[in-house]
Every structure is written in structure tokens, then in C-alpha cells.
Amino acid sequence: DGGITQSPKYLFRKEGQNVTLSCEQNLNHDAMYWYRQDPGQGLRLIYYSQIVNDFQKGDIAEGYSVSREKKESFPLTVTSAQKNPTAFYLCASSNRRGNQPQHFGDGTRLSIL
Amino acid sequence: RKEVEQDPGPFNVPEGATVAFNCTYSNSASQSFFWYRQDCRKEPKLLMSVYSSGNEDGRFTAQLNRASQYISLLIRDSKLSDSATYLCAVNHMDTGRRALTFGSGTRLQVQP
């Protein structure tokens, strides 16, 4: 079954701790994305990557970091610099051509302990 | 002004009703448009792409009005299962940013 797998489903972060959210896709998509969604809000773009070993900041990149060492994987690290990390984090992927829709994983809910 | 705007609702409609949502976008160079459905505490799922000539998928019809810079979604014969939040998404091809920009969503509640 082709799809996007995010893990873990739920994550708790202590003060001063960095945590990493996993995103893996087997759709052979070139592009991958990370969004943050706060309750009752839309999706805000954190980072995106159009190709391996390249990524760009989105609208709210501060306090986050990413890597794209493999086509299938685009992990997101929420650093201690992100003071309000509680949110629903969604990973997506798409064909690199800009006119293609994005498909989402089922998300990770991050909370502060 | 937000790049992509939607009426947050909620739209409360009886079963069988026809309901329409609009989504306005500010960048006239936008080229790709989509509607997503998001259930409570779940990920968004692609409902349909929006084509220039308009397109239909069963009870759902999507239209694009480039002159007024909005897209619309029409749902006919609403079902209880249509209750969800509907997000529009737009791709601005001219900025070099190849990622969708999402509206905040319109919540639909279909009542028996």
C-alpha cells in the first residue's frame, strides 16, 4: 500500500528538549512538506523540500529544523527554541510539478509536559 | 489580507440541502486549486482538484472564477457524513514557492 507514514501519533516534550517527528513516504514523490495546525486554524507551512538534499523555509520555520537525506524521508525536529510547540503536525508529499495536489500522513500530536 | 480566505462557518444545513462554499485568493498568478476535506482530529484528504472549466464528482461541483479570484464548492443532497471542515488550497506558481497555501477552512454541520 502506497502512502505516507508519520510517527509517533502522540508525542510529549519536556522543557528544553528537542524532539523529532518522523515522516516516510513510498509514493516515489520528489516533494515533501511539513505543516502545523493549531486548534480551529488552517495549515501553516513550516518547511518543504523539492528534492533530496535541498529544503526551504516556509512561513513559520523558526524553532524547527529538517533534513532530506533520502527521497523517502523528511524528519522534522522541534527544537527547544520553539516556545509554543503544542499543535498537530502534518507531513505531506507530492509530485514535484507545482500543479499537483499534496497527500497527507495522519499526523503527530505534540504536547508539552 | 490573507492569501487564501474562507468563511469559517459553521454552516448548519438539514440533510438533503444544497450548500456552497467560496474561497478567495489574493495572488492573481495562482494556477492550481484544490478542495480538501478534514474530519475532526484527522488529516486533510483531497476531495477534488478545481479545473478552469469547472468539474463535478457525484454530488460535488467545483468552479473557478479567475476574474473575481475565487473558487467554489457546491454540495448537493447533503448527507450526515458530509459534516466536516472543507479547506481550499492554492498554489502560487510565480513566487518559486512550490507548496500549497491553505485557507483556514469552512466547517459544515449537516443535521438530521
Image (cartoon, coloured by chain):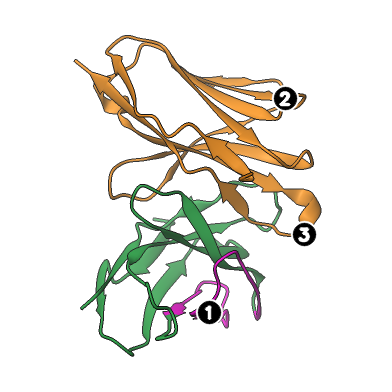
Chain colours: A green, B orange
The disc at residue B22 is: none
Give above or below for A74 relative to B9.
below
Please tell me whether residue A96 belongs to the stretch shown in magenta: no
From the image, tell me which residue sits under label 2.
Answer: B68
The chain letter under disc 1 is: A
Task: Tell me the CA gap for discs 1 and 2.
Answer: 38 Å
Give above or below for A104 relative to B60.
below
B14 sits left or right of A58 in the view: left
Q: Secondary structure at mark 3?
A: loop
Q: Secondary structure at mark 1?
A: strand
Q: Quadrant of the C terminus of chain B?
A: top left
Nearer mark to the viewer, of 2 and 3: 2
Q: Are marks 2 and 3 on the same chain?
A: yes
The amino acid pointed to by label 3 is: Gly
At 46% across and 49% down in the image, what residue appears?
Answer: A42
From the image, tell me which residue sits under label 1.
Answer: A66
B83 sits left or right of B101 in the view: left
At 52% across and 34% down in the image, what residue appears?
Answer: B6
